[in-house]
Each structure stands twice: as C-alpha cells, then as structure tokens.
C-alpha cells in the first residue's frame, strides 16, 4: 500500500488539472485504490519498479521531489 501511496504522490506531481485534484483528494481521504487506474496513466511500470526497489520516493530516481519546477503546474 505504501508503494501505491508514493505512486499517487508522483502521479499528482505529474498530472494536469483536473486529474491532479482528483488524485490529491483520494490521497488525502486515503482512498488511493479508487484512483489506481488514473495513477497508472502518469506512473510507468519502470517507475513502480523503482518505488518497490527503494521503498520510497527518492530524489535520485524522481527529481520532481526536490525541484518543484519539474512538477506539472508548479514552480516559478
């Protein structure tokens, strides 16, 4: 479940509106299973493998974590 939670956060960073808001609302309500198909649109199987290997969203694998300008709709 932690892997899907991290995948949802990554998908939220990558998704445009309105998907971004949908994913965020599901994360906040702890209903990630409801948006699993939507998450898989923005998170590839290779990304899922990285999440499983490290067990977390690591900035080496996912630069969006440390650099907000890489996130969709965020940054200056």
Image (cartoon, rainbow, N blue to C red):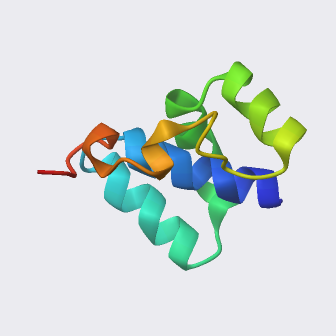
Residue 20, position as x, y percentages in the image = 35, 52
Residue 39, position as x, y percentages in the image = 56, 41
Q: Quadrant of residue 15?
A: top left
Q: Nearer the viewer, residue 30 or 51?
A: 51
Q: Report whether 52 appears left or right of 67.
A: right
Residue 46, position as x, y percentages in the image = 72, 20
Q: Report whether 26 appears left or right of 51.
A: left
Q: Nearer the viewer, residue 8 or 61?
A: 61
Q: Report whether 20 appears left or right of 23.
A: left
Outermost residue, bottom direction?
Answer: 29
x 52%, y 77%: residue: 28
x 44%, y 64%: residue: 24
Q: Nearer the viewer, residue 56 or 4?
A: 56
x 58%, y 32%: residue: 43
Q: Nearer the viewer, residue 41 or 56?
A: 56
Outermost residue, left direction?
Answer: 76
Q: How many numbered marks appear?
A: 0
Q: Is residue 39 above or below residue 6?
A: above
Q: Quadrant of residue 1?
A: bottom right
Q: Is residue 42 above or below residue 44?
A: below
x 40%, y 59%: residue: 22
């Amino acid at each position: 479940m932690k892997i899907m939670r991290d995948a949802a956060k990554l998908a939220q960073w990558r998704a445009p509106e309105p998907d971004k808001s949908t994913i965020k609302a599901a994360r906040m309500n702890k209903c990630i299973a409801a948006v699993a198909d939507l998450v898989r649109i923005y998170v590839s199987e290779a990304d899922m493998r990285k999440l499983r290997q490290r067990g977390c969203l690591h900035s080496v694998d996912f630069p969006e974590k440390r650099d907000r300008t890489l996130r969709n709709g965020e940054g200056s």
